[in-house]
Amino acid sequence: AQSVAQPEDQVNVAEGNPLTVKCTYSVSGNPYLFWYVQYPNRGLQFLLKYITGDNLVKGSYGFEAEFNKSQTSFHLKKPSALVSDSALYFCAVRDLGALSGGYQKVTFGTGTKLQVIP
Amino acid sequence: DTAVSQTPKYLVTQMGNDKSIKCEQNLGHDTMYWYKQDSKKFLKIMFSYNNKELIINETVPNRFSPKSPDKAHLNLHINSLELGDSAVYFCASTQRTSGGIEQFFGPGTRLTVL
């Protein structure tokens, strides 16, 4: 089975400081990795994805993520945090899953709450 | 302009009742999903349909029955509601034939079973 782990339930960072939200993954083949953000009382919004190519992926709202194959990690980063970045962040992996007949199934991590302190 | 819409947004009901949640997407996508998010914010896939055909059916009680009248709609009917069904249910869609990478989520339906 393929999975992702987000080791931190919550990350606190001061406004203007760099932020990192951690994610590690486990897959049998090549990983397709994603980050989504969920603002309070809203659905999830896609931030960025890694499929292949450059290990540093840039996404929406100034976020980026670094794919590290040797460490099986895909950490989300931003150089300077904003209070408006406070939200719940989900890492996800695409799972082709034999039991699903090859159809895409995305497995989400447990989420990390980011709190940016003014 | 709404890409993925769900109705109702809030649903409060008594244990044992039957209820439905509706989902519609106007993105022209061919694949739709239902997810359940529990009180700890853990997100779990329940079902997925591709062109009205069920392709993913996770371990979900038989009381939950999805129905897709066309590829733009995926409804979720729940029979004999239980306390443990209280959660936020999200609908999502993607275009599988284009790689199906990015999923678009609806705003969610908060179900409270009393």
Image (tube, coloured by chain):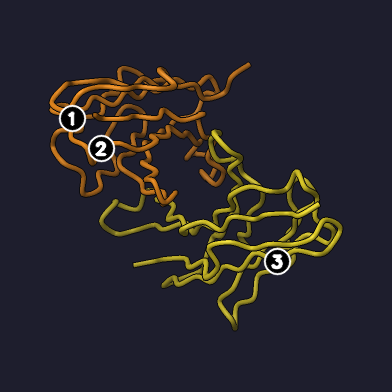
Label 1 Cα neighbours within 10 Å, binned few <14 / some 14-19 / many ≥20: many
Left or right? Give the position of B58 relative to A65. left
The orange-coloured chain is labelled B
- Residue depth check, mark 3 versus mark 2: number of the one nearer the observer: 2
Q: Position of residue A25 (x, y in %)?
A: 50, 70
Residue A104 in view here: no
Q: Do tag 3 and tag 2 residues touch (Cβ < 8 Å)?
A: no
Left or right? Give the position of B38 relative to B15. right
Q: Position of residue A6 (x, y in %)?
A: 52, 66
The amino acid at mark 2 is Asp
**Helix, strand, or loop for circle 1?**
loop
Cα distance in 3D space between marks 1 and 2: 7 Å
The amino acid at mark 3 is Thr
**Helix, strand, or loop for circle 3?**
strand
Residue A82 in view here: yes
Cα distance in 3D space between marks 3 and 1: 40 Å
- Residue depth check, mark 3 versus mark 1: number of the one nearer the observer: 1
Q: Along the line of sight, which residue is nearer the eye, A93 or B76?
A: B76
Q: Chain of mark 3?
A: A
Residue picked out by circle 2: B85
The residue at 21%/27% (across/down) is B78
Residue picked out by circle 1: B81
- Quadrant location of the N terminus of chain A in the rendered image: bottom left
On the same chain, marks 1 and 2? The answer is yes
Residue picked out by circle 3: A20
The yellow-coloured chain is labelled A
- In this rendering, the answer to whether B80 lies above or below A3 is above
The residue at 29%/51% (across/down) is A100
Q: Along the line of sight, which residue is nearer the eye, A5 or A85?
A: A85
Q: Chain of mark 2?
A: B
**Helix, strand, or loop for circle 2?**
helix
The amino acid at mark 1 is Leu
